[in-house]
Amino acid sequence: MLDDPTGFLRWLAAARQQGCVCFDDVDVAQVFAIAAVAALARQDGAAPLRLEPAASTGAGRFAHAMGIAEVVRGAEERLPSERDRSVTLTRVRGRGPWESISERIVGLLLPAPRPPAADLFYHVIVELLRNVGQHSNDALGGIVAAQINDGGPYQGAPALQVVVVDNGIGVFEALRHMRPSIATPGEALVRALEPHVSGAFPEGESGSGENAGLGLFVISEMAKETDGRLLLASRGASYFLDRSRSPDSQPVITNGDAPDYPGTLVVFETALGHVGSFDGIMAHIRDLAAQRTPKRITYRWLRFEPAPPGVHRILVGVASEDTAAAAAFAQSVLAPRLVRREPVVLDFGTIRVTTQSFLHALLHEAVRLAWALRVPVHVANASPAVRAQLELVEGYSLGG
Ligand SMILES: Nc1ncnc2c1ncn2[C@@H]1O[C@H](COP(=O)(O)OP(=O)(O)OP(=O)(O)O)[C@@H](O)[C@H]1O
Ligand SMILES: [Mg+2]
Protein backbone atom coordinates (compact mmCIF):
# COMPACT_ATOMS: atom_id res chain seq x y z
CA MET A 1 0.00 0.00 0.00
CA LEU A 2 1.02 3.59 -0.50
CA ASP A 3 1.50 3.89 3.27
CA ASP A 4 4.85 2.20 2.77
CA PRO A 5 6.32 2.62 -0.71
CA THR A 6 9.78 1.53 0.43
CA GLY A 7 8.33 -1.74 1.68
CA PHE A 8 6.77 -2.30 -1.72
CA LEU A 9 9.99 -1.44 -3.58
CA ARG A 10 11.91 -3.83 -1.35
CA TRP A 11 9.42 -6.62 -2.08
CA LEU A 12 9.70 -5.84 -5.79
CA ALA A 13 13.51 -5.84 -5.66
CA ALA A 14 13.42 -9.36 -4.20
CA ALA A 15 11.02 -10.49 -6.91
CA ARG A 16 13.22 -8.96 -9.60
CA GLN A 17 16.18 -10.84 -8.25
CA GLN A 18 14.25 -14.08 -8.60
CA GLY A 19 12.95 -13.03 -12.02
CA CYS A 20 9.46 -13.92 -10.95
CA VAL A 21 6.55 -12.17 -9.27
CA CYS A 22 4.05 -14.11 -7.28
CA PHE A 23 1.19 -12.67 -5.30
CA ASP A 24 0.96 -15.77 -3.10
CA ASP A 25 2.18 -14.01 -0.01
CA VAL A 26 0.30 -10.72 -0.54
CA ASP A 27 -3.19 -10.14 0.77
CA VAL A 28 -3.71 -6.56 -0.34
CA ALA A 29 -2.05 -4.69 -3.17
CA GLN A 30 -3.19 -1.29 -4.30
CA VAL A 31 -3.43 -0.48 -7.97
CA PHE A 32 -0.08 1.35 -8.09
CA ALA A 33 1.73 -1.84 -7.08
CA ILE A 34 -0.13 -3.94 -9.64
CA ALA A 35 0.74 -1.44 -12.39
CA ALA A 36 4.40 -1.29 -11.35
CA VAL A 37 4.63 -5.09 -11.54
CA ALA A 38 2.70 -5.26 -14.82
CA ALA A 39 5.09 -2.85 -16.54
CA LEU A 40 8.05 -5.09 -15.66
CA ALA A 41 6.24 -8.24 -16.75
CA ARG A 42 5.35 -7.01 -20.25
CA GLN A 43 6.26 -9.90 -22.48
CA ASP A 44 7.34 -7.68 -25.33
CA GLY A 45 9.92 -6.10 -23.00
CA ALA A 46 13.63 -6.90 -23.01
CA ALA A 47 13.75 -9.17 -19.92
CA PRO A 48 10.23 -9.57 -18.61
CA LEU A 49 9.54 -10.69 -15.07
CA ARG A 50 7.61 -13.93 -14.92
CA LEU A 51 4.14 -13.66 -13.37
CA GLU A 52 2.94 -16.59 -11.33
CA PRO A 53 -0.81 -16.62 -11.36
CA ALA A 54 -2.02 -16.59 -7.75
CA ALA A 55 -5.76 -16.70 -7.57
CA SER A 56 -5.57 -17.69 -3.93
CA THR A 57 -4.93 -14.25 -2.45
CA GLY A 58 -6.78 -10.95 -2.50
CA ALA A 59 -3.90 -9.28 -4.31
CA GLY A 60 -3.77 -11.99 -6.97
CA ARG A 61 -7.50 -11.76 -7.63
CA PHE A 62 -7.34 -7.97 -7.77
CA ALA A 63 -4.43 -8.08 -10.24
CA HIS A 64 -6.47 -10.31 -12.52
CA ALA A 65 -9.55 -8.13 -12.22
CA MET A 66 -7.34 -5.20 -13.21
CA GLY A 67 -6.48 -7.02 -16.45
CA ILE A 68 -2.84 -7.78 -15.65
CA ALA A 69 -2.80 -10.90 -17.85
CA GLU A 70 -3.98 -9.01 -20.93
CA VAL A 71 -1.68 -6.05 -20.35
CA VAL A 72 1.33 -8.29 -19.89
CA ARG A 73 0.49 -10.17 -23.09
CA GLY A 74 0.03 -6.85 -24.86
CA ALA A 75 -2.33 -8.54 -27.27
CA GLU A 76 -4.24 -5.45 -28.22
CA GLU A 77 -4.42 -1.93 -26.83
CA ARG A 78 -7.57 -1.87 -24.74
CA LEU A 79 -9.53 1.10 -23.47
CA PRO A 80 -9.76 1.56 -19.71
CA SER A 81 -12.83 0.03 -18.11
CA GLU A 82 -14.24 0.17 -14.61
CA ARG A 83 -14.45 -2.70 -12.11
CA ASP A 84 -15.62 -2.09 -8.61
CA ARG A 85 -14.41 1.54 -8.39
CA SER A 86 -11.09 0.74 -10.03
CA VAL A 87 -9.99 1.40 -13.60
CA THR A 88 -8.20 -1.43 -15.37
CA LEU A 89 -4.55 -1.23 -16.39
CA THR A 90 -4.11 0.41 -19.76
CA ARG A 91 -1.06 0.64 -21.94
CA VAL A 92 -0.44 4.03 -23.52
CA ARG A 93 2.15 4.12 -26.25
CA GLY A 94 3.91 6.97 -27.99
CA ARG A 95 2.38 10.38 -28.13
CA GLY A 96 -1.21 9.91 -27.37
CA PRO A 97 -4.14 9.80 -26.96
CA TRP A 98 -3.34 11.28 -23.58
CA GLU A 99 -6.35 13.56 -23.26
CA SER A 100 -9.07 11.11 -24.25
CA ILE A 101 -7.72 8.33 -22.03
CA SER A 102 -7.47 10.68 -19.06
CA GLU A 103 -11.00 11.93 -19.63
CA ARG A 104 -12.27 8.38 -19.85
CA ILE A 105 -10.62 7.30 -16.60
CA VAL A 106 -11.95 10.31 -14.74
CA GLY A 107 -15.41 9.85 -16.22
CA LEU A 108 -15.50 6.19 -15.15
CA LEU A 109 -14.60 6.90 -11.54
CA LEU A 110 -16.21 10.30 -11.05
CA PRO A 111 -19.30 10.36 -13.24
CA ALA A 112 -21.52 13.42 -13.64
CA PRO A 113 -22.20 15.73 -11.94
CA ARG A 114 -18.50 16.33 -12.36
CA PRO A 115 -16.83 17.20 -9.04
CA PRO A 116 -13.79 19.55 -8.87
CA ALA A 117 -11.66 16.46 -8.18
CA ALA A 118 -12.39 15.28 -11.74
CA ASP A 119 -10.68 18.36 -13.19
CA LEU A 120 -7.72 17.88 -10.88
CA PHE A 121 -7.24 14.20 -11.69
CA TYR A 122 -7.69 14.84 -15.40
CA HIS A 123 -4.75 17.26 -15.18
CA VAL A 124 -2.56 14.88 -13.25
CA ILE A 125 -3.12 11.95 -15.61
CA VAL A 126 -2.57 13.98 -18.81
CA GLU A 127 0.68 15.47 -17.50
CA LEU A 128 2.04 12.10 -16.37
CA LEU A 129 1.16 10.37 -19.65
CA ARG A 130 2.77 13.23 -21.60
CA ASN A 131 5.92 12.78 -19.57
CA VAL A 132 6.11 9.11 -20.46
CA GLY A 133 5.62 9.90 -24.16
CA GLN A 134 8.03 12.82 -24.21
CA HIS A 135 10.80 11.84 -21.81
CA SER A 136 10.89 8.15 -20.88
CA ASN A 137 12.25 6.60 -24.11
CA ASP A 138 10.35 3.44 -23.20
CA ALA A 139 9.45 1.86 -26.54
CA LEU A 140 6.59 0.00 -24.84
CA GLY A 141 5.15 3.26 -23.48
CA GLY A 142 3.55 3.50 -20.07
CA ILE A 143 0.78 1.93 -18.06
CA VAL A 144 -1.96 3.91 -16.36
CA ALA A 145 -4.54 2.78 -13.80
CA ALA A 146 -6.68 4.28 -11.04
CA GLN A 147 -8.62 3.24 -7.99
CA ILE A 148 -10.93 4.73 -5.39
CA ASN A 149 -10.22 3.36 -1.91
CA ASP A 150 -12.78 3.77 0.83
CA GLY A 151 -12.14 0.91 3.24
CA GLY A 152 -9.60 0.36 6.01
CA PRO A 153 -7.51 3.47 6.60
CA TYR A 154 -9.61 5.32 3.99
CA GLN A 155 -12.88 4.76 5.88
CA GLY A 156 -14.88 7.97 5.86
CA ALA A 157 -12.46 9.75 3.50
CA PRO A 158 -12.44 7.97 0.14
CA ALA A 159 -9.32 8.73 -1.89
CA LEU A 160 -8.53 8.38 -5.56
CA GLN A 161 -5.17 6.89 -6.46
CA VAL A 162 -3.70 7.18 -9.95
CA VAL A 163 -0.55 5.54 -11.19
CA VAL A 164 1.47 6.09 -14.35
CA VAL A 165 4.54 3.92 -14.81
CA ASP A 166 7.19 3.22 -17.45
CA ASN A 167 10.43 1.27 -17.66
CA GLY A 168 12.34 4.02 -19.43
CA ILE A 169 15.53 5.95 -18.78
CA GLY A 170 14.41 7.66 -15.55
CA VAL A 171 14.35 11.31 -14.53
CA PHE A 172 18.09 11.71 -13.82
CA GLU A 173 19.09 10.50 -17.26
CA ALA A 174 16.38 12.59 -18.94
CA LEU A 175 17.43 15.77 -17.15
CA ARG A 176 21.19 15.61 -16.83
CA HIS A 177 22.12 16.65 -20.38
CA MET A 178 20.37 19.99 -20.10
CA ARG A 179 21.19 20.37 -16.39
CA PRO A 180 24.82 19.31 -15.96
CA SER A 181 24.86 20.77 -12.45
CA ILE A 182 22.54 17.99 -11.24
CA ALA A 183 24.81 15.37 -9.69
CA THR A 184 22.61 12.56 -8.36
CA PRO A 185 19.28 10.83 -9.11
CA GLY A 186 17.90 12.15 -5.81
CA GLU A 187 18.78 15.71 -6.73
CA ALA A 188 17.20 15.19 -10.15
CA LEU A 189 13.86 14.24 -8.57
CA VAL A 190 13.85 17.28 -6.31
CA ARG A 191 14.81 19.63 -9.14
CA ALA A 192 12.27 18.11 -11.55
CA LEU A 193 9.55 19.24 -9.15
CA GLU A 194 10.66 22.86 -9.40
CA PRO A 195 9.08 25.15 -12.00
CA HIS A 196 10.91 25.44 -15.34
CA VAL A 197 13.30 22.58 -14.71
CA SER A 198 13.12 20.34 -17.77
CA GLY A 199 15.24 18.09 -19.90
CA ALA A 200 13.76 19.86 -22.94
CA PHE A 201 15.52 23.22 -22.62
CA PRO A 202 18.60 24.63 -20.87
CA GLU A 203 18.93 26.34 -17.52
CA GLY A 204 17.80 29.96 -17.49
CA GLU A 205 15.02 29.51 -20.02
CA SER A 206 11.37 29.08 -19.13
CA GLY A 207 10.06 26.90 -21.93
CA SER A 208 10.43 25.29 -25.33
CA GLY A 209 7.70 24.87 -27.92
CA GLU A 210 6.40 21.75 -26.15
CA ASN A 211 7.48 22.01 -22.52
CA ALA A 212 7.56 24.52 -19.72
CA GLY A 213 9.00 22.28 -17.01
CA LEU A 214 5.78 22.73 -15.07
CA GLY A 215 4.04 19.35 -15.19
CA LEU A 216 5.58 17.81 -12.07
CA PHE A 217 5.66 21.15 -10.25
CA VAL A 218 1.90 21.57 -10.72
CA ILE A 219 1.24 17.97 -9.67
CA SER A 220 3.32 18.27 -6.50
CA GLU A 221 1.60 21.54 -5.59
CA MET A 222 -1.76 19.84 -6.15
CA ALA A 223 -0.70 17.10 -3.73
CA LYS A 224 0.28 19.70 -1.14
CA GLU A 225 -2.84 21.82 -1.61
CA THR A 226 -5.12 18.84 -1.10
CA ASP A 227 -3.15 17.12 1.69
CA GLY A 228 -2.51 14.22 -0.64
CA ARG A 229 0.36 11.92 -1.46
CA LEU A 230 2.90 11.90 -4.26
CA LEU A 231 5.38 9.12 -4.92
CA LEU A 232 8.06 9.42 -7.57
CA ALA A 233 10.41 6.46 -7.83
CA SER A 234 12.85 6.71 -10.70
CA ARG A 235 16.10 4.86 -11.29
CA GLY A 236 18.33 5.37 -8.27
CA ALA A 237 16.08 7.57 -6.19
CA SER A 238 12.64 8.06 -4.75
CA TYR A 239 10.62 10.97 -3.44
CA PHE A 240 7.59 10.45 -1.23
CA LEU A 241 5.42 13.26 0.08
CA ASP A 242 2.63 12.17 2.40
CA ARG A 243 0.44 15.00 3.60
CA SER A 244 -2.51 12.72 4.34
CA ARG A 245 -1.67 12.26 8.00
CA SER A 246 -0.03 15.58 8.79
CA PRO A 247 -0.30 18.76 6.69
CA ASP A 248 3.26 19.78 7.60
CA SER A 249 5.07 16.56 6.83
CA GLN A 250 8.15 16.85 4.64
CA PRO A 251 9.05 14.56 1.75
CA VAL A 252 11.21 11.49 2.32
CA ILE A 253 13.92 11.21 -0.33
CA THR A 254 16.14 8.22 -0.99
CA ASN A 255 19.21 8.36 -3.19
CA GLY A 256 20.99 5.10 -3.89
CA ASP A 257 20.41 3.96 -0.32
CA ALA A 258 17.11 2.13 -0.83
CA PRO A 259 15.46 -0.07 -3.45
CA ASP A 260 14.43 1.91 -6.53
CA TYR A 261 12.23 1.37 -9.57
CA PRO A 262 13.75 0.47 -12.97
CA GLY A 263 11.96 3.23 -14.86
CA THR A 264 9.68 5.92 -13.53
CA LEU A 265 6.80 5.16 -11.19
CA VAL A 266 4.53 8.06 -10.26
CA VAL A 267 1.60 7.72 -7.87
CA PHE A 268 -0.74 10.53 -6.95
CA GLU A 269 -3.45 10.10 -4.36
CA THR A 270 -5.78 12.47 -2.64
CA ALA A 271 -9.02 12.31 -0.69
CA LEU A 272 -11.90 13.29 -2.94
CA GLY A 273 -13.34 15.49 -0.20
CA HIS A 274 -10.13 17.53 -0.05
CA VAL A 275 -10.50 18.99 -3.51
CA GLY A 276 -12.67 22.00 -2.73
CA SER A 277 -12.19 24.35 -5.66
CA PHE A 278 -10.20 23.62 -8.77
CA ASP A 279 -10.19 27.35 -9.67
CA GLY A 280 -8.70 28.17 -6.26
CA ILE A 281 -5.97 25.54 -6.57
CA MET A 282 -4.95 26.79 -10.03
CA ALA A 283 -4.88 30.42 -8.88
CA HIS A 284 -2.63 29.44 -5.98
CA ILE A 285 -0.28 27.53 -8.29
CA ARG A 286 -0.12 30.49 -10.70
CA ASP A 287 0.95 32.75 -7.82
CA LEU A 288 3.58 30.29 -6.62
CA ALA A 289 5.03 29.88 -10.12
CA ALA A 290 5.04 33.64 -10.68
CA GLN A 291 7.26 34.09 -7.62
CA ARG A 292 9.78 31.69 -9.13
CA THR A 293 9.81 33.03 -12.71
CA PRO A 294 12.33 35.71 -13.68
CA LYS A 295 10.62 39.09 -13.90
CA ARG A 296 11.40 40.85 -17.13
CA ILE A 297 7.91 41.83 -18.11
CA THR A 298 7.08 45.46 -18.58
CA TYR A 299 3.81 45.12 -20.40
CA ARG A 300 1.29 42.35 -20.82
CA TRP A 301 -0.46 41.69 -24.11
CA LEU A 302 -2.98 39.12 -22.97
CA ARG A 303 -6.06 41.23 -22.29
CA PHE A 304 -8.99 40.06 -20.20
CA GLU A 305 -11.21 43.13 -20.53
CA PRO A 306 -13.75 43.13 -23.41
CA ALA A 307 -12.15 43.52 -26.85
CA PRO A 308 -12.97 46.48 -29.07
CA PRO A 309 -15.68 45.73 -31.65
CA GLY A 310 -14.66 44.14 -34.92
CA VAL A 311 -11.66 42.17 -33.67
CA HIS A 312 -11.45 38.72 -35.24
CA ARG A 313 -12.83 36.11 -32.83
CA ILE A 314 -11.47 32.58 -32.63
CA LEU A 315 -13.37 29.88 -30.79
CA VAL A 316 -10.74 27.93 -28.87
CA GLY A 317 -13.03 24.95 -28.43
CA VAL A 318 -12.36 24.12 -32.06
CA ALA A 319 -8.90 22.86 -31.16
CA SER A 320 -10.41 21.12 -28.11
CA GLU A 321 -8.03 19.49 -25.61
CA ASP A 322 -5.65 18.11 -28.15
CA THR A 323 -2.16 19.53 -27.57
CA ALA A 324 -0.89 18.64 -31.02
CA ALA A 325 -3.90 20.35 -32.59
CA ALA A 326 -3.29 23.42 -30.42
CA ALA A 327 0.34 23.60 -31.55
CA ALA A 328 -0.65 23.25 -35.21
CA PHE A 329 -3.35 25.88 -34.79
CA ALA A 330 -0.91 28.27 -33.10
CA GLN A 331 1.48 27.92 -35.98
CA SER A 332 -0.96 28.05 -38.87
CA VAL A 333 -3.56 30.54 -37.64
CA LEU A 334 -2.44 32.48 -34.60
CA ALA A 335 1.17 33.30 -35.46
CA PRO A 336 0.48 34.56 -39.00
CA ARG A 337 -2.23 36.90 -37.70
CA LEU A 338 0.02 38.33 -35.03
CA VAL A 339 2.84 38.73 -37.51
CA ARG A 340 0.42 40.74 -39.66
CA ARG A 341 -0.26 42.75 -36.47
CA GLU A 342 -3.92 41.72 -36.39
CA PRO A 343 -5.30 41.49 -32.86
CA VAL A 344 -7.48 38.48 -32.06
CA VAL A 345 -10.03 37.43 -29.48
CA LEU A 346 -9.55 33.92 -28.13
CA ASP A 347 -12.98 32.81 -26.98
CA PHE A 348 -12.84 30.00 -24.40
CA GLY A 349 -16.63 29.77 -24.28
CA THR A 350 -16.93 26.04 -24.73
CA ILE A 351 -13.89 25.07 -22.66
CA ARG A 352 -14.70 24.19 -19.08
CA VAL A 353 -11.27 23.21 -17.99
CA THR A 354 -7.98 22.87 -19.77
CA THR A 355 -4.50 21.60 -19.08
CA GLN A 356 -1.35 23.63 -18.72
CA SER A 357 0.18 21.77 -21.65
CA PHE A 358 -2.71 22.64 -23.97
CA LEU A 359 -2.45 26.36 -23.18
CA HIS A 360 1.32 26.20 -23.46
CA ALA A 361 1.11 24.68 -26.93
CA LEU A 362 -1.46 27.28 -27.94
CA LEU A 363 0.17 30.37 -26.51
CA HIS A 364 3.83 30.05 -25.54
CA GLU A 365 5.06 31.43 -28.86
CA ALA A 366 1.99 33.57 -29.43
CA VAL A 367 2.41 35.69 -26.30
CA ARG A 368 6.06 36.24 -27.19
CA LEU A 369 5.04 37.38 -30.66
CA ALA A 370 2.28 39.55 -29.22
CA TRP A 371 4.78 41.15 -26.88
CA ALA A 372 7.46 41.67 -29.53
CA LEU A 373 5.04 43.12 -32.07
CA ARG A 374 2.83 44.91 -29.53
CA VAL A 375 -0.37 43.24 -30.71
CA PRO A 376 -2.97 42.40 -28.07
CA VAL A 377 -4.46 38.94 -27.72
CA HIS A 378 -7.86 39.38 -26.13
CA VAL A 379 -9.36 36.61 -24.04
CA ALA A 380 -13.10 36.10 -23.67
CA ASN A 381 -15.13 33.74 -21.51
CA ALA A 382 -12.24 32.19 -19.63
CA SER A 383 -13.18 30.44 -16.37
CA PRO A 384 -11.17 31.55 -13.31
CA ALA A 385 -8.97 28.45 -13.55
CA VAL A 386 -8.33 28.94 -17.27
CA ARG A 387 -7.53 32.61 -16.67
CA ALA A 388 -5.08 31.70 -13.90
CA GLN A 389 -3.35 29.29 -16.27
CA LEU A 390 -3.26 31.85 -19.08
CA GLU A 391 -1.60 34.34 -16.73
CA LEU A 392 0.85 31.65 -15.75
CA VAL A 393 1.78 30.96 -19.39
CA GLU A 394 2.19 34.68 -20.10
CA GLY A 395 4.31 35.13 -16.99
CA TYR A 396 6.87 32.50 -17.82
CA SER A 397 6.78 32.82 -21.61
CA LEU A 398 7.75 36.48 -21.36
CA GLY A 399 9.96 35.92 -18.32
CA GLY A 400 12.32 33.56 -20.09
N1 LIG B 1 8.51 9.45 -17.13
C1 LIG B 1 9.66 10.14 -17.19
N2 LIG B 1 10.79 9.55 -17.64
C2 LIG B 1 11.96 10.22 -17.72
N3 LIG B 1 12.09 11.52 -17.35
C3 LIG B 1 11.02 12.17 -16.91
C4 LIG B 1 9.74 11.53 -16.79
N4 LIG B 1 8.86 12.43 -16.30
C5 LIG B 1 9.57 13.59 -16.13
N5 LIG B 1 10.85 13.44 -16.51
C6 LIG B 1 11.92 14.46 -16.46
O1 LIG B 1 11.52 15.48 -15.56
C7 LIG B 1 11.48 16.72 -16.25
C8 LIG B 1 10.41 17.61 -15.65
O2 LIG B 1 9.12 17.10 -15.97
P1 LIG B 1 7.89 18.12 -16.01
O3 LIG B 1 6.68 17.38 -16.37
O4 LIG B 1 7.88 18.90 -14.74
O5 LIG B 1 8.32 19.16 -17.14
P2 LIG B 1 8.35 18.98 -18.73
O6 LIG B 1 7.66 17.72 -19.10
O7 LIG B 1 9.75 19.14 -19.19
O8 LIG B 1 7.50 20.24 -19.21
P3 LIG B 1 5.89 20.37 -19.19
O9 LIG B 1 5.37 19.31 -18.27
O10 LIG B 1 5.63 21.75 -18.66
O11 LIG B 1 5.48 20.19 -20.60
C9 LIG B 1 11.28 16.38 -17.70
O12 LIG B 1 11.71 17.42 -18.58
C10 LIG B 1 12.12 15.11 -17.83
O13 LIG B 1 13.48 15.44 -17.98
MG1 LIG C 1 5.77 17.29 -18.33
Image (cartoon, helix red, strand yellow):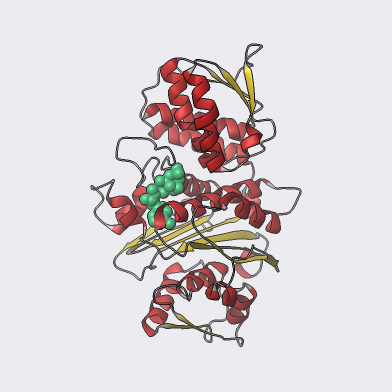
| 307 versus 177 height, above or below | above
From this viewpoint, is residue 227 visible? no
Total numbered labels placed on residues in the image: 0
- Rendered location of residue 156, percent (x, y): 68, 61
Residue 303 shown left or right of residue 348 in the figure: left
| 272 versus 73 height, above or below | above
- Rendered location of residue 259, percent (x, y): 35, 71
* Residue at screen point 51% across, 41% down: 357
From this viewpoint, is residue 400 visible? yes
Identity of the residue furthest to the top in this view: 309
* Image quadrant where residue 352 sits: top right
- Rendered location of residue 290, percent (x, y): 44, 31
* Residue at screen point 50% across, 34% down: 286
Q: Nearer the viewer, residue 108 or 343?
A: 343
Q: Nearer the viewer, residue 94 or 12?
A: 94
| 320 versus 368 height, above or below | below
| 399 versus 110 height, above or below | above
* Image quadrant where residue 110 sits: bottom right
* Residue at screen point 60% across, 40% down: 354
* Residue at screen point 60% across, 84% down: 57
* Image quadrant where residue 210 sits: top left
Q: Quadrant of the C terminus?
A: top left
- Rendered location of residue 54, percent (x, y): 57, 86
Identity of the residue furthest to the right in this view: 113
Q: Nearer the viewer, residue 261 or 76?
A: 76
